[in-house]
Image (cartoon, rainbow, N blue to C red):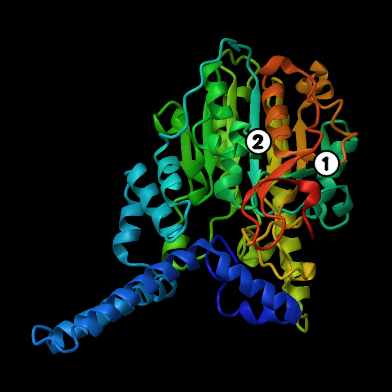
């Protein structure tokens, strides 16, 4: 299941082919989805009401044929609406696209969120986040004036096995990232336990440093970017399309740069924006720091990528890799396209690293993904992410930190990360702490890894969602 919606029809046979047991698991997952529950409840309610109306009015002269037809129509209306939502998923009405295209920011974002998560129990929380009014503004006592660059890069659907030294030979950009580590300007982090297996719940916890046992606080807690703005940073949020929804009041109230791709693929059936579209905007934001004569404020930037979100083959330029060979099984083809998407992600990170190298002052970037993804090769009865149970595949993600020569000479990255390498796993909140410490907040202290990382999830089907140890998750 993907984000509360059933998978496209052409994916269903692929899921069923894994095994009969897994197919049953996928079907049970569908029954647990908020979308299914809400539409099912509405449909049953209308069915019962209309049936009672028809029954008690069967002998009444006041109930004519037109009335009976109207009542029957009310009975099937929820089902019709549900089908309509699915049928227009690739081609919604023009008025939705027009509102989104309008430069009304909040109104456009609200419509996009409402369309994207209709029928979801996250609906009203997403509306608040889109308006930028849910998060409190930070009030830091420390003030930072020395020029520097702080970057948080948020990936999408990148599994822990999708990036790292084990992928060195996959392509030139993975090799360059590993070379950067060996040169002393980057570090691979232990696998990270994401706080949730969906973007809309994971990212608010990531950017606020809220742990899964306090998950509800993530919608109101000050964001890290807000803290940095309060401490004296010029801030910006650059995102691929709808990923801009998670910026806080420091952005939506006009205190910093806000840029998101205007590609309306979600609304017109096209392909998603490429992450390379974000990079010129980021480079322009960073450019003042490339002059040694710069005396302005430090700068902090969040790059929220489209990453490796399904459909994988739409997330990278088709000319970047050789054409997909014929004769592959569905599982083999998915593996290949997911690898291509992740290698393109490595290319994006390598470009960010080059931007750091151009900065004349200490500069660093922290990377992690919002969650992973379930693939056919996992044979766990789940597809993509946000399933009825939380899997290791959809939860464990990579962590990576880069810095430039000036930051290396300061010794700060080495101090902040000195305890990290020995950890078996990290919690998502550890990445937030690394981001804040490298930025000069929290005393530039050494980050102590969380002993038992938590995820807001469900270990098995039927469990109620809540904070559980990542170690308890099954594949």
In this rendering, the answer to whether 186 lies above or below 19 is above
State which quadrant residue 387 falls in. Answer: bottom right
Q: Residue 16: x and y, percent? A: 69, 80
What residue sits 40% from the left and 46% below the top? 127
Towards the viewer: 291 or 473: 473
Q: Position of 40 compared to 328: left or right? A: left
The Cα atoms of the two marked residues, 1 and 2, are separated by 15 Å
State which quadrant residue 463 falls in. Answer: bottom right
In this rendering, the answer to whether 408 lies above or below 322 is above
Residue 133 appears in view: yes
Which image quarter is the C terminus in?
bottom right
Q: Secondary structure at mark 2?
A: loop
Residue 304 appears in view: no
Q: Residue 141: x and y, percent? A: 56, 10
Q: Position of 198 compared to 49: left or right? A: right
Towards the viewer: 329 or 408: 329
What residue sits 53% from the left and 44% below the top? 239
Q: Secondary structure at mark 1?
A: loop
Does the residue at mark 1 contact the one at mark 2 (Cβ under 8 Å)? no
Towards the viewer: 386 or 61: 61
Reading the image, the residue beneath label 2 is 211
Dot 2 surroundings within 10 Å: few (below 14), some, or many (20 or more)? many
Residue 321 circle label:
none
What residue sits 65% from the left and 52% below the top? 197
Residue 425 circle label:
1
Which image quarter is the N terminus in?
bottom right
State which quadrant residue 417 falls in. Answer: top right
For marks 1 and 2, the one nearer the N-term is 2
Q: Residue 167: x and y, percent? A: 85, 54
Q: Position of 33 compared to 111: left or right? A: right
Dot 1 surroundings within 10 Å: few (below 14), some, or many (20 or more)? many
In this rendering, the answer to whether 214 lies above or below 119 is above
């Amino acid at each position: 299941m993907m984000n509360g919606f059933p998978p496209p029809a052409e994916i269903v046979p692929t899921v069923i082919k894994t095994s009969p047991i897994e197919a049953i698991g996928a079907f049970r997952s569908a029954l647990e989805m908020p979308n299914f529950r809400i539409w099912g409840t509405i449909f049953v309610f209308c069915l019962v009401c209309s049936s009672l109306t028809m029954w008690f009015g069967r002998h009444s002269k006041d109930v004519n044929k037109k009335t009976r037809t109207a009542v029957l129509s009310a009975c099937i209306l929820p089902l019709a609406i549900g089908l309509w939502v699915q049928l227009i998923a690739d081609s919604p009405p023009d008025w939705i696209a027009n509102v989104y295209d309008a430069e009304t920011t909040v109104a456009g974002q609200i419509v996009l969120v409402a369309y994207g998560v209709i029928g979801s129990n996250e609906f009203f929380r997403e509306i608040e986040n889109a308006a930028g009014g849910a998060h409190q503004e930070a009030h830091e006592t420390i003030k930072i004036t020395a020029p520097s660059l702080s970057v948080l890069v948020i990936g999408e659907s990148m599994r822990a096995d999708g990036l790292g030294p084990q992928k060195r030979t996959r392509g030139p950009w993975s090799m360059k990232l590993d070379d950067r580590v060996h040169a002393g300007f980057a570090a691979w982090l232990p696998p990270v336990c994401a706080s949730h297996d969906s973007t809309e719940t994971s990212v608010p916890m990531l950017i606020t440093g809220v742990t899964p046992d306090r998950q509800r606080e993530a919608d109101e807690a000050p964001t890290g970017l807000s803290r940095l703005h309060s401490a004296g940073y010029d801030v910006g949020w650059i995102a691929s399309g709808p990923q801009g929804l998670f910026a806080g009041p420091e952005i939506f109230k006009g205190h910093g740069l806000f840029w998101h791709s205007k590609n309306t693929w979600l609304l017109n059936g096209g392909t998603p924006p490429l992450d390379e579209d974000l990079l010129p905007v980021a480079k322009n934001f960073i450019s003042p720091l490339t002059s040694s004569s710069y005396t302005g404020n430090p700068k902090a930037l969040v790059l929220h990528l489209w990453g490796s979100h399904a459909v994988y083959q739409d997330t990278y330029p088709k000319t970047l890799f050789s054409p997909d060979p014929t004769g592959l099984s569905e599982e083999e083809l998915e593996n290949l396209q997911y690898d291509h998407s992740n290698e393109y992600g490595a290319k994006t990170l390598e470009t960010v690293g080059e931007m750091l190298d151009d900065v004349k002052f200490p500069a660093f970037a922290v990377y992690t993904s919002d969650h992973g993804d379930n693939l056919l090769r996992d044979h766990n009865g789940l597809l993509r992410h946000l399933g009825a149970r939380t899997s290791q595949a959809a939860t464990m993600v990579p962590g990576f930190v880069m810095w430039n020569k000036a930051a290396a000479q300061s010794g700060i990255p080495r101090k902040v990360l000195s305890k990290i390498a020995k950890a078996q796993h990290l919690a998502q909140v550890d990445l937030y702490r690394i981001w804040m410490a490298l930025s000069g907040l929290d005393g530039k202290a050494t980050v102590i890894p969380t002993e038992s990382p938590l995820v807001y999830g469900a270990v098995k089907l039927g469990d109620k969602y809540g904070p559980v140890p990542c170690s308890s998750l099954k594949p």
